[in-house]
Amino acid sequence: MNASNPANLDRFRLLATFVAGRSVDVAEAPAGRPAHTNGRTVFVSADRSTAEQRREMLVQTALLGAGSLDRHLVRTLRARPAVARRYLALEGCRVLAELGEKVPLATTLGPLEPPGTATAEESLEVAAGRVPVADPPEWFGVIRPSRLLAATAGAGAQATDKELRLDFDPIDLPEADDDDRDSEQATGSRILRLFENPLFNSRALSDRLRKLFGDSRSPGDGAAGAEMRVRAVRRVRKVGANARPLPTRIGFTDDGKPGAALGVGGALHPEWDVHSQRYRPDWCRVIDFPLTVAADISAAGVPPDDVLRRRLSRIGLGSKVLRSRPDGDELDIEALIDLVVDLRSGYSPAENIYLERRKLERDLGVLILLDASGSATDTDPAGLTVHDHQRRAAATLALTLEELGDRVAVYAFRSQGRHAVHLPAIKTFDQRFGAVGRARLNQLQPSNYTRLGAGIRGAGEILRNEAGTQNRLLVVLSDGFPYDDGYEGRYAEADARKALEELRADGVACLCLSIGAATATDALERVFGSAGHAGATTLSELSPRMDELFLSSLRELAASKPR
């Protein structure tokens, strides 16, 4: 059995692209995971024969080509595994029957039930009903709605006319991606960049064309120095193979580069590669910038949460000395002198001669990091999206903490590849959460992807530099599903956990809340690790124990500090 050889999967790509009607890649899923697709890559089972992997690939690409995984269909399957399994059984038989008319190979895959539905919409209606449906064969794989919905535009949708004509705008061409080598040479000419498009994603073909055409860029492609990479001296906390590189601040000067339209710089952050057990230095570009709002600033109010306010008001982190107490930790010398003077003067006052130290001062800085990626667009039965729930939770938390006297900032995060991780600022530490801040939050729309580790590192850097308090807490509002280009599965989960560990090592506590998302507890545990985390339908469900969540996160931080 030689299914693990990548050459066996390479031979599937042409057939997969033909069946799907769009460019798709074929790769092996992690061991023990069934076949599935995220719309761009079809993952087949590991340790299977070539024939079995080809069979899995055909059914998944047939679903893509028939439009069975369009966004409006897959959205209704989120958090409904039984319906998704029934839908897969119906649609799998239907699309394979249709495919058999074009690809005779599809008729030899195995005994299948005759199709009982004529369209994907009909299959979905039957799957959601009570009509008995036989379980799909194991080689059908599974449907992963979360991965298909992670993109803003449906990754599982049918190819558009623009894609079929191979007619795309130059701005859609991906920037040349630097691989993990020490040399950082500028890559490829315009011709090479064309062949680095996913439609021509063969590494062997790309490498061959580099040898033929050379590695230099075409002259005159912009202002002088426009193609030069940003370089900096890298600093590390300690000497060692796995030492974490510190972020490198950068500034944009070329109008054609990412972030220039925002008029701001950014920072290059490392990313943890769990497969090689080491950091990738300067791997992600994180850009924080002020979020602009429309001219008609809404003065929409924030609904009060009295339970949340009472609970959070109990948090005392800084010691305050109370003088002239009837009991306490030590003698108050000034009160003792006053008592002696009063006694010698003929008065008999109360003997309040002690100092009492209480944790009454808050001394707390909180940065609320709101997930504004495309995965937050799922709706509940009331028609509210995950983004709506998380946005309301962010507003209530920010207003409550600000009224209690804490230092509060609110940022969102989204990403589009490792070169563009955006942190739009809704409220900085020095701003009030007034009408402008509420308008920014209300007008925020989810889009793009979720490079969670980079977002956490960028927010942590802001919290460390701008909070101005001894106690600092990062509150992440997310569905806990990290996903981006080349960033998913075990790799993404390990990087997010590593980013949270880095924050705690730097003296920043972490609390992760999943509001309105149907994310399983074990999935939150894999992503957030030992950091404090909780999930609920609404913030009000967590309000009665929010003080416990805050304090437990801060206690974990104190326990992890070296004595």
Image: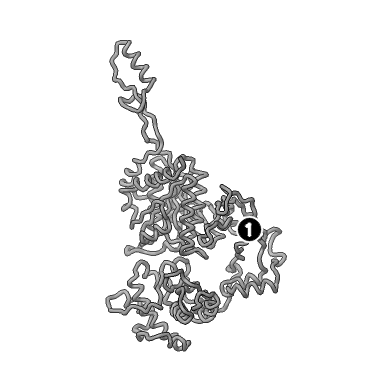
The location of residue 104, given as percent across then percent down, is 46, 89
Q: Is residue 335 left or right of residue 189?
A: left
Front position in the image: 409 or 62 = 62
User: Residue furthest toward the top?
Assistant: 345
Is residue 528 visible in this depiction of the protein? yes
The location of residue 302, given as percent across then percent down, is 37, 50
Vertical comparison of 213 with 239: above or below: below
The location of residue 364, given as percent across then percent down, is 43, 41
Is residue 62 visible in this depiction of the protein? no
- In percent of the image, x 31 and y 13: which residue is there? 343
Vertical comparison of 330 with 300: above or below: above
Front position in the image: 40 or 155 = 40
Query: In the rendered view of the protein, which quadrant contains the C terminus?
Result: top left
Would you name the residue on which mark 1 appears? Answer: 255
User: Residue furthest toward the right?
Assistant: 219
Front position in the image: 460 or 45 = 45
Circle 1: element type? loop
Q: Is residue 35 left or right of residue 163?
A: left
Vertical comparison of 341 with 489: above or below: above
The amino acid pointed to by label 1 is Asp
User: Residue furthest toward the front?
Assistant: 1
Q: Is residue 542 left or right of residue 486?
A: left
- In percent of the image, x 43 and y 39: which residue is there? 363
Callout 1 environment at 10 Å: few (<14), some (14 to 19), or many (20+)?
few
* Count of all numbered marks drawn on residues in the image: 1
**Applied colour scheme:** one colour
The location of residue 225, given as percent across then percent down, is 69, 58
